Image (cartoon, rainbow, N blue to C red):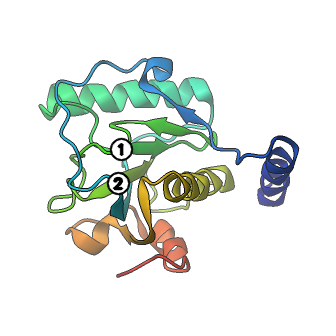
Amino acid sequence: MFRLAVFLCALCAVSWGFLCLRIVTPGKWGGRPANCSSPLKAVQTGYVIVLHTAGGSCKTGAECNQQMTNIQHYHMNNKGWCNIAYNFLIGEDGKVYEGRGWNTEGAHTYGYNDISLGIAFMGDFTGRSPNAAAWIALKHLLHFAVENGYLSSDYLLMAHGDVSNTISPGQPIRKVLKTWPHYKH
C-alpha cells in the first residue's frame, strides 16, 4: 500500500508538476471562525512540533471533517481556547487539515506556541503508527512550508514529548521521526 501511495504521488508530481499536498481549509471542513489570532514571533519559524490528538482517527474525508469539527468544538467550548490548538492536522485520508494555519500562534506546546508550527496526526498513536498516506502528507507539508518561506530550511523537528511531559505523539511516531534528518531530541 505504501509503495502504491508513493507511486501515485510521484505520478501526480510528474504529471502536473506539483506535490500531492492537499490542504483542507476550515471553510471546507466546517470550521468556525477563530475568536483570536496572534502571529508567530517570526514569519519563518525554525521549529515543528509533531503531536497526536489522542482521540479518534479518520480515514475518509467525511470522517476527518467530522473529527476536525469535534476537535475544534472541544478546544473552543470545553478548553476555552480561541480556536483549535494546532496549526495543521493530518488525517489518514492523506490530507492536511488547516487549524490555525501559517504564521499564527498555536496552543499546542507550552513554551513553543509562538515559535513553532504544531502539526497533529488525528488519532491515538500510542499503540500504532499512522498509515503511509498520513506520513506522506506530513512530508509534503514540511516540504511546502520550506519552499514557500513558512519554515526555515534548517528547521528542527521534535515530538511533543521531547519538549513537554507527555506521551504525545506516541512511541510509534517518535520511532519514525527519529530517522528523519531534521529530528532533534
Look at the image and tell me whether residue 52 can be seen.
yes
Q: Nearer the viewer, residue 173 or 110?
A: 110
Query: In the picture, residue 176 is in which quadrant?
Result: bottom right
Left or right: where 161 falls relative to 164: right
Q: Which residue occupies the foreground of this view, 19 or 9?
A: 19
Labels 1 & 2 near each other (Cβ < 8 A): yes
Please tell me the numbered disc located at residue 151: none
Above-or-below relation of 67 to 96? above
Quarter of the image for the C terminus: give it.
bottom left
Residue at 25% x, 51% y: name it.
108
* Secondary structure found at label 1: loop
Q: Secondary structure at mark 2?
A: strand
Instruction: Residue 157 in the image: state x and y as whole percent.
Output: 41, 70
- In this view, the residue in front, 176 or 26, is 26
Residue behind mark 2: 117
Residue at the farthest left position: 80
Picture residue at 45% right of the left edge, 54% below the top: 149
Please state which amino acid type lies under the numbered disc 1: Asn
For the image, the number of numbered tags is 2
Circle 1 residue? 87
Is residue 122 something one can see in this rendering?
A: no
Q: Amino acid at mark 2?
A: Leu
- Rendered view: 66 above or below 111: above
Q: Residue at x 50, y 59 (%)?
A: 146
Is 82 placed left or right of 145 in the picture?
left
Relative height, residue 106 to residue 31 (above, below): below
Q: Nearer the viewer, residue 46 or 120?
A: 46
Image spot of residue 49 (x, y percent): 35, 61
Q: Quadrant of residue 128?
A: bottom right
